[in-house]
Amino acid sequence: MKRYFITASGTEIGKTFVTSLLIRQLRAKGKSAAALKPLITGYTDETAPESDTRHLLDALGLPMNAQNIAAISPWRFEAPLSPNMAAQREARQIDLKEVVNFCNAARNGGEDYLLIEGVGGVMVPLDDIYTVRDWIMILQMPALLVTGSYLGSISHTLTALEALQSRGIKVAGIVVSESPASPVPLDETLETLSRFSGGVRLHGVQRLDNPGNAADLTYLLN
């Protein structure tokens, strides 16, 4: 089983879109895939139909029911905040060891690929000590870094890349998900990033009504 952690330079960047796209493309190639979104905030009965968890289940071809929701997103919090803050609102605490054990258990599923989608950006806190970066380090998985093309995204992307690589995390690729009302063409953002990203593979994804028209991303998983 090949395993990858999907993280980002910030929140609302496009992690779920990219993860769902990868799942669909892998399945179209005859490959089996499992996906997890262990931690999710801003999750309520009202938001569930449009949640990240729902999009991943759709990509996997699974129905949105209580069993499947719990199977891929067991840690769900109502407040749309960082995980540590959202957990505090509910007098709960995230135990990173339990999250890691949950992720590692999925290695026994037998699928060709396991994609784990993080929460927020690379350095978002999970509790008073650990961040998403620590989570990735403990899992010892290569990361795909999803970023945007908004004004300031180049600095945010390179900062996130440095944060990952400084702790020895392998970055399999950077996926630039085109931001709404982006001030510059996606190609220009990619060209600039290519000069500062040290040879890390770059791929741009345009805002598309039909993901079926998107270019193949799965080469980043090899």
Image: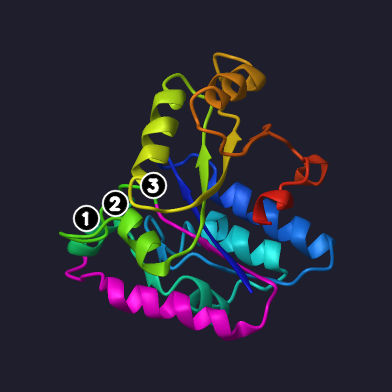
Foreground: disc 3 or disc 2 = 3
**Secondary structure under the numbered disc 1 in the rendered image:** helix
Q: CA distance from mark 3 to mark 2?
A: 19 Å
In the rendered image, residue 57, in percent from the top left (x then y), is placed at 63, 67
Q: Residue 211 occupies which quadrant of the picture?
A: top right
Foreground: disc 1 or disc 3 = 3
In the rendered image, residue 96, in percent from the top left (x then y), is placed at 29, 71
Q: Residue at x 38, y 47 (%)?
A: 164
Q: Marks 2 and 3: in contact by CB < 8 Å?
A: no
Residue 24's place in the image compared with 139, above or below, is above
Amino acid under disc 3: Leu
Label 3 belongs to which residue? 164
> Closer to the N terminus: mark 1 or mark 3?
1
For the magenta stretch, what is the residue range? 90-119
Label 2 belongs to which residue? 82
Label 1 belongs to which residue? 85
Amino acid under disc 2: Ser
Task: Answer few, some or many: residues within 10 Å of disc 2's Cα (few below 14, many 20 plus, some between 14 and 19).
Answer: many
Q: Residue at x 41, y 42 (%)?
A: 11
Q: Residue at x 61, y 48 (%)?
A: 17
